[in-house]
Image: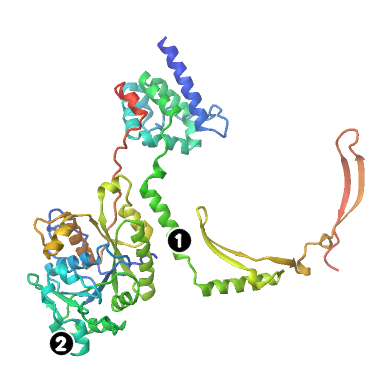
Amino acid sequence: MAMATATAISGRVAGEASAILAPSASFLPAPLRRAPCSKTHFCAFPRGAPSKLMLKPGRLCLERQRCLLQRSSTTYALSRGDFSPVAQDVEGFLHSVVNMGFLDRLKLAWKIIFPAPTIHENTNASIAKQRLKMILFSDRCEVSDEAKKKIVENVVEALSEFVEIESRDSVQVDISTDAGLGTVYSVTVPVRRVKPEYQESDEQYRGKIVGVDFKDTGESSGNVDVTFDFYVPSENP
Amino acid sequence: MAFAPRLLPPRPPAPAAATARHNGGRTAPELSGPTPRVVVVTSGKGGVGKTTTTANLAASLARLNFPVVAIDADAGLRNLDLLLGLENRVHLTAADVLAGDCRLDQALIRHRSLQGLHLLCLSKPRSKLPLAFGSKTLTWVADALRRSATPPAFILIDCPAGVDAGFVTAIAPAEEAVLVTTPDITALRDADRVAGLLECDGIKDIKIIVNRVRPDLVRGEDMMSALDVQEMLGLPLLGVVPEDSEVIRSTNRGMPLVLTDPPTPAGLALERATWRLVERDAMTAVMVEEQERPKKKGGFFFSLFGG
């Protein structure tokens, strides 16, 4: 009876674990088997020797308990973060779970089903650090008005070689900060049209298709079978 | 804004402060660099503790038997004399020296108990607003001190808040800077700006003192730690001074904090900073240890099971 419940719980835990730990990739039994229970990944401690975990299940429970208590709110974040190494170790994890006591498994299940939210990003200090980083970047990258004018002139000059600009006054330069990229300079240039020599046109496409031969036009079978020759005139006169 | 280390003369390893003033068997730090060393204490933002830091660094240096001149470069609002307890003895200032009314050594005020400490104020507060101070004023004063009969080993300049003309005047003669900041976002932004201005002016040796750190808030992740500050500003750290109510008491008494016995945490930190200043050393900030996080609400359910 105890064994049955134990396996049932471990099965459920495994199911949940695999669902959460490898959301995108489907979980198949890992082809290469690492040494079982080589990593107590839920604790984020360095890997213990396998013998320690297998031969002393009581000790394992204690260690597991201690580390769960100490890092209760951050361990789950850790296991959520890295998928691939953990997915392979779920085999080892199952082994270690089976050896845990009932209460420990229940706790584990609770923590999987109701994970503690990551509180790392919401502390005041980290918010302040983020804001300070953004403000330091934008302060350091702030250019003077004179530099802005010169940027506009240079950009307009470079672009007018290829396109015709609508009007010089409608060019806008903008400096902003973006969370992902940092400081972003954007110069907006309204364009009237592209200069003729740079226009994308059909004449550039100088190759010709000749000798088209349809073996099967696809009306009956749904497949098209065609051969043709693509003729590109040589560049040298 | 990376700190480019200069070639230093080989020095013994930095002392580990075991007890109050017993620095690993050494009684005095080794002076590094040519004297007099002109150091400006600046911050950008007001109220972070520039004047307190200047007064205490000067007092610490004097106690280590280095002759030091502390200059209050704030021409309009004067505070350094209050912190050193010399406010009643200021009669002649640098303004009088420049006007030719007195000699430079007459304007230097010696501290009662610390023999090597002299104070120089730039002008009297009740006089006409100082318009005539050009940016070369303090350069002239520093040169005059250098040429005098007993040149000081250190010249500490207490910079006024802001980045206007007073600031430009104060940093003109300096070769090194001590940037005082607190771990909050406003002070750090201003400190960054000031660091940029100092580097433009040619002062490459800038070190930070993080003042008014509250370890309980840092542990609770409400305040940035000294490590964060160093990471943000990218400058070497001279010292980390905790928030201490002794600062207020010593200011009220008019005696520098480092002279109190038994020494207080802030006083100890400032003394260590003084050692590092003399030896041109920098400290490495250590991460505050992570404490056990408070258990989540779901956890109490398991505490019933003896968790």
Mark number displayed over residue B103: 2
Q: Is residue A103 left or right of residue B71?
A: right
Give the answer, above or below, for where A121 lies relative to A193.
above
Residue B242 in picture, x, y percent from top left: 23, 54
Q: How is the image coloured?
A: rainbow
Q: Chain of mark 1?
A: A
* Residue B121, above or below A112: below
Total numbered labels placed on residues in the image: 2
Residue at (29%, 75%) from the top-left corner?
A: B175
Residue named by callout 1 = A137
Q: What chain does badge 2 belong to?
A: B
Image quarter in which the N terminus of chain A is found: top left
| Crowd class of label 1 (few under 14; some 14 to 19; many from 20; radius 10 Å) | some
* Residue B8 pos. (x, y %): 28, 69
Q: Name the one closer to the observer, B300 or B201.
A: B300
Q: Nearer the viewer, residue A9 or B183?
A: B183
Q: Residue furthest bottom?
A: B100
Q: The residue tagged with tag 2: helix, strand or loop? A: loop
Answer yes or no: is residue B26 visible. Answer: no
In the picture, which quadrant includes the C terminus of chain A?
bottom right
Local packing at callout 2 (Cα closer than 10 Å; few below 14, some 14-19, many 20+) is some
Question: Dividing the picture into quarters, in which one does residue B171 lie?
Answer: bottom left
Residue B31, x across and y down, in percent: 19, 70
- When the figure is inspected, residue B65 is found, relative to residue B98, above or below; the finding is above
How far from the left and from the top, in percent, is residue A64? Answer: 35, 28
Q: Given contact means CB atoms under 8 Å apart, are the residues at marks 1 and 2 in contact?
A: no
Label drawn at residue A165: none
**Residue B74 versus residue B300: which sits nearer the camera?**
B74
Q: Residue at x 56, y 73 (%)?
A: A149
Residue B79: tell me if it is visible.
Answer: yes
Which residue is outermost to the top?
A: A1
Disc 1 element: helix
